[in-house]
Amino acid sequence: MSKILVTGGAGYIGSHACIELILAGYKVVVLDNFSNSSPESINRVNKLLNSEIISYQGDISDELILNRIFKEQSIKAVIHFAGLKAVSESIANPIHYYHNNVTGSIILSSVMQKFGCKTLIFSSSATVYGQKKIMPIDENSSLIPNNPYGRNKLVIENYLRDLYISDNEWSIGLLRYFNPVGAHDSGLIGEDSKVPNNLMPFIAQVAIGKRKKLSVFGGDYPTKDGTGIRDYIHVMDLANGHIKAMKYLFKNRELITLNLGTGKGFSVLELIHSFEAASGNQIPYEIIERRDGDVAESFANPSLAEKVMGWKAKYQINRMCEDTWRWQKMNPNGYN
């Protein structure tokens, strides 16, 4: 049974990827410093699947813990989710972000190379594209990220491209995903957001009464209802995309760069109304000023992922809302 190291495996996307890995027959090893996650997510995956995830607490920039993992475990591949992810925080503290995300990724890959483990899936982001006027966005779109978080992702992508050019024994997947939402259908695993970075958790917290109303940034965009349009993808579709990419790279020594999205855009108001239908609760909202840097619409062209590795998102917006609502009801205070 092949062992896969999942960095940031206790986090939102990482924990769902652990589920997909176990269901696909892999043994999972997690490295997480729990700065933005909880060990409880790993406990719940184990209970849910009657599995035994091997867990290490530590940081990807800590060479000692990485050496220990690779000495103690026969790691066949790494799925790399670990990283700081708040755009506003990256603007306020770029030193912390570049050190943690960029330096950490370099140290991780250097230890992988030392131990002869050369299959890596990197969790990138649609933020590498920056602001685009032409939709949908495909993998050949220009890369002009407009905040340190997005620039972190692009620096790591470029570093991994150079690594592959230097040594074609590497198999590397750069997966750029759009807006992850939803939760596992058990309601036991989901996004633990005390102060959310994304729209869906804010909506869910309003629906359950933790917040009085939702602030909608901008109602005068040139869209169908004046609010911003985004490509929302179910976290389980996203997790499945990582497994598909890993299996592809086990067979093909390549570097692949792929969008993971649905190819459809939904406005903020459409998302609110879908969540109202899923929860049976009204979502009070107030339209306020636009935020600097926000664009009218952003959605993916995900056709290359289907062509290369046979992956296509299957969950619709109503299912994304239903699963998020189930998680929120069962876990009003997250994993605590």
Image (cartoon, grey):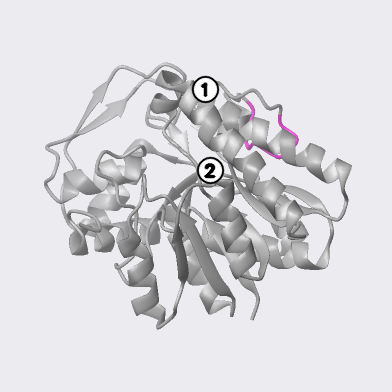
Please tell me whether residue 138 belongs to the stretch shown in magenta. yes
Residue 306: give x, y in percent of width and height: 70, 59
Residue kind at label 2, given as amino acid type: Phe
Residue kind at label 1, given as amino acid type: Asn
Q: Residue at x 44, y 29 (%)?
A: 87
Please tell me whether residue 300 belongs to the stretch shown in magenta. no
- Quadrant for residue 320, please give it: bottom left
Q: Residue at x 61, y 31 (%)?
A: 128
Residue 170: give x, y in percent of width and height: 81, 54
Residue 97: give x, y in percent of width and height: 49, 29
115 relative to 28, above or below: above
In the displayed structure image, the side of residue 334 where residue 122 appears, left or right? right
Q: Which mark is residue 178?
A: 2
In the rendered structure, which segment of residues is drawn in magenta?
A: 134-141
Q: Residue at x 16, y 35 (%)?
A: 213
- Quadrant for residue 57, please give it: bottom left
Label 1 sits on a secondary structure element that is: loop
Q: Which residue is mark 1?
A: 147
